[in-house]
């Protein structure tokens, strides 16, 4: 049944456009042209973020910050095993998923650490990637409040997630 949803939706769109006398192919070409222009305008920002993430991880700064933050984070109820995930999640979605897989295989899917890691990974967003895409389109370069507030909100969500997982 579910396999018919997408073909039915496409069929309904084609039928609706035929009733409204819309030239589907021309609209598709216009959309494809606009998407190429969007990629051209967004790509430099995304490339810069990916380069910064790679430098952050490969320089060893990620591991040093993780070791530095382990003790203070333990005071708010976050296990030290999750420090690297907390550092990586705002930077890289695929990197945090790989780390999440490692956490689950190491500690087991039903452990407190794995449950916290799943909630953190599932409820967080890659702040820097989203900021790069958003700011490339809105042409505003005022990051003085947006990124720190997003990072603080992500941290608060992480603390609350670990607190909730402790009682579940």
Image (spheres, rainbow, N blue to C red):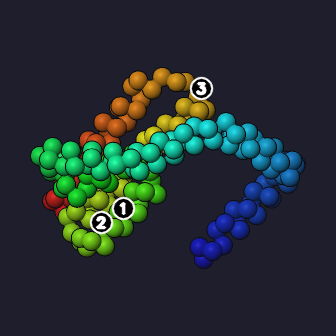
Identify residue for label 1. Answer: 99
The residue that mark 3 highlights is 139
Distance between the Cα atoms at labels 3 and 2? 39 Å
Front-lying residue, 57 or 40: 57
Quarter of the image that includes the N terminus? bottom right
Residue 19: tell me if it is visible. Answer: no
Q: Secondary structure at mark 1?
A: helix
Residue placed under numbered mark 2 in the picture: 103
Going from the N terminus, do you reach mark 1 or mark 3 first?
1
The answer to which image quadrant residue 18 occupies is bottom right
Q: Position of residue 110 (x, y in %)?
A: 24, 71
On the image, the x and y values in percent for residue 118 come to 32, 61
- Examine the rendered structure and indicate whether residue 21 appears above or below residue 146: below
Q: Residues within 10 Å of mark 1 (few under 14, many from 20)?
A: some
Callout 3: 10 Å neighbours few (<14), some, many (20+)?
few
Q: Quadrant of the C terminus?
A: bottom left
Q: Which mark is residue 53?
A: none
Please, which residue is most extreme toward the bottom here? 1
Do tag 1 and tag 2 residues touch (Cβ < 8 Å)?
Answer: yes
- Residue at 80% of width from left, 50% of height from top? 28
Cα separation between marks 1 and 2 = 6 Å
Residue located 49% across and 36% down the image: 131
Mark nearest the camera among 1 and 3 is: 1
Instruction: Work out whether 132 lies above or below 54.
Output: above
Residue 81 visible to an observer of this rendering: yes
Secondary structure category for the residue under label 3: loop
Of callouts 3 and 2, which one flags the residue occurring earlier in the amino acid sequence? 2
Is residue 61 shown left or right of residue 44? left
Residue at the image position 57 percent from the left and 43 percent from the top: 47
Depicted 147 relative to depicted 21: above or below:
above
């Amino acid at each position: 049944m579910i396999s018919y949803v997408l073909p039915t939706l496409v069929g309904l769109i084609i039928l609706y456009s035929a009733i409204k006398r819309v030239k589907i192919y021309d609209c598709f070409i216009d959309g494809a042209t606009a998407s190429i222009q969007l990629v051209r305008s967004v790509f430099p920002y995304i490339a810069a973020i990916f380069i910064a993430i790679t430098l952050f991880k490969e320089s060893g700064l990620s591991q040093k910050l993780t070791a530095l933050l382990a003790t203070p984070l333990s005071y708010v109820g976050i296990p030290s095993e999750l420090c690297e995930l907390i550092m990586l999640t705002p930077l890289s979605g695929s990197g945090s998923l790989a780390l999440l897989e490692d956490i689950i295989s190491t500690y087991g899917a039903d452990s407190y650490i794995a449950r916290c890691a799943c909630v953190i990974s599932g409820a967080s967003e890659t702040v820097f990637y989203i900021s790069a895409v958003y700011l490339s389109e809105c042409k505003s370069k005022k990051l003085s409040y947006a990124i720190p507030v997003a990072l603080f909100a992500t941290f608060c969500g992480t603390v609350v997630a670990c607190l909730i997982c402790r009682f579940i």
